[in-house]
Amino acid sequence: MLFRDVLVDENLKQQLISLVKNNRISHAQLFLGPAGSHKFALAIAYAQYILCANRGEEDSCGTCPSCVKFAKLAHPDLHLIFPDANTDSKKSQKGTAQQQAMAKFINFVTENDYHLDYNQWSEGESKQLNINANDCSFIVHQNNIRSYESGYKIFILWMAERLYHGAAPRLLKTLEEPENKTLFILIAENSEKILPTILSRTQLIKIPKLSKETIKSELQNKFNVNERTADDIAEISEGNYIKAIELLNDSEAIELLLDDFKFILESAVAHARSDIQNIRFIELQERFTKIIAEGREKQKQFIRYMIQMFRNILLVNSNKTELLRATTKEKNILSTFTPYIKLRNISPITEACNKAILYIERNGNSSLIFNNLYFNIANRLQVR
Ligand SMILES: [Zn+2]
């Protein structure tokens, strides 16, 4: 990982680079930053810069043997410590379970472009994951043996708040008086959850959340997202890159919901106006069939989406657009339906939607429920 690929403020990179240049590297640092900031990438870039055999003024060389090993996260003097379910103390660090866990972790890091999220990492695990006593023994042991090749030993502890409290005392002495050229980089999101005794032994490096502009340009450059969508997602994700990616993956799903909503409401308007030519009854049934085939949860999700859209139409009608939480595409579609949704019909329409959700929960016939809901809405639209 090169500094230039890390999504943090340039001044922060310079601060770390100058620590290395002036030989003022602290032996224990805490990289503290909110969820979705690129702090793990920064820690790796920093460690790589320290060990680079040919480092430049601004960045590692990227090509020396040390950098090549860093690119695979396989440098023998780089030790990655992370929360893990494995607590079997009899297994040595070279045991198969640890090797598997490490391979899984490295895969997780590269798959997510070094944007790590604890909830994603622990997904599917039945219990909380910890940095456990086993990990602490490993650190203490490695601290006491020689560096493999660089002269340094660098430990990066991801999610320091998940350090098992019972195991922490083993680390304190090592953190306070590590062997020469042993470095600790602790990464955390919430300093309140870190033991004060650990906190007081580290130098704090604060990593701010990403700016809206950074997220927007990443989405445009890396994922080819159009400017409007990138702008919408950057706005809603509030500086959290991981959330932005989730929204990006979701945005297709939202577009499908919107498309179905638009079709159904257009048809309902045609019905309400007795505009027979514009009622596409067959396609309407096909849309219902498609939604129904996705199961009861998705059916309810779609109706909840309709309720949200009806409320949004009313907001546009009442000139309260500042309360709208909608994408640009949604806003455009909402404004075409403003003549039909007013204060006087929003309640019965919402009520019909809520009843439909209730019937779905009671295992009613979904096709009947959707058709009923459709006619309920069509009958209540304002067409005069
Ligand atoms: Zn290098």
Image (spheres, rainbow, N blue to C red):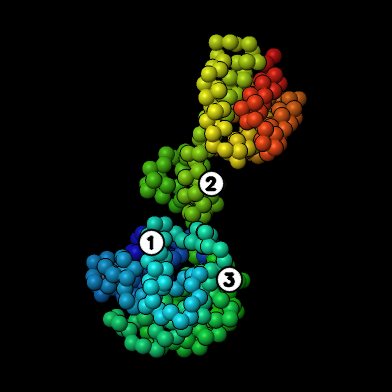
- Report x, y in % for residue 338: 64, 24
Under tag 1, what secondary structure? helix
Kindly report which numbered mark, 3 or 2, lies closer to the viewer in this rendering. Answer: 3
Q: Residues within 10 Å of mark 2 (few under 14, many from 20)?
A: some
- Residue 307 in the image, given as x and y percentages of width and height: 66, 34
The residue at which mark 2 appears reads as 235
Q: Are marks 3 and 2 in contact (CB under 8 Å)?
A: no
User: Could you tell me if residue 19 is visible in this image?
Assistant: no
* Mark sitting on residue 191: 3
Identify the secondary structure beneath mark 2.
Answer: helix
Element carrying mark 3: helix
In the image: residue 223, left or right of residue 254: left
Q: Is residue 37 above or below residue 85?
A: above
- Residue position marked by numbered label 1 in the rendering: 107
Q: Residue at x 53, y 68 (%)?
A: 129
Q: Between residue 158 and residue 363, name the one nearer to us.
A: 363
Q: What is the three-letter code of the residue carrying label 3?
A: Ser
Within 10 Å of disc 3 (Cα), the crowding (few <14, some 14-19, many 20+) is some
- How far apart, in angstroms, are the residues tagged by discs 3 and 2? 26 Å
Asked whether mark 1 and ligand 1 are closer than 8 Å, the reply comes as: no
At 60% from the left edge and 71% from the top edge, which residue is drawn? Answer: 193
Q: Amino acid at mark 2?
A: Glu
Residue at horizontal 50%, vertical 43%?
250
Q: Position of residue 199 (x, y in %)?
A: 56, 78
Residue 319 placement, left or right of 151: right
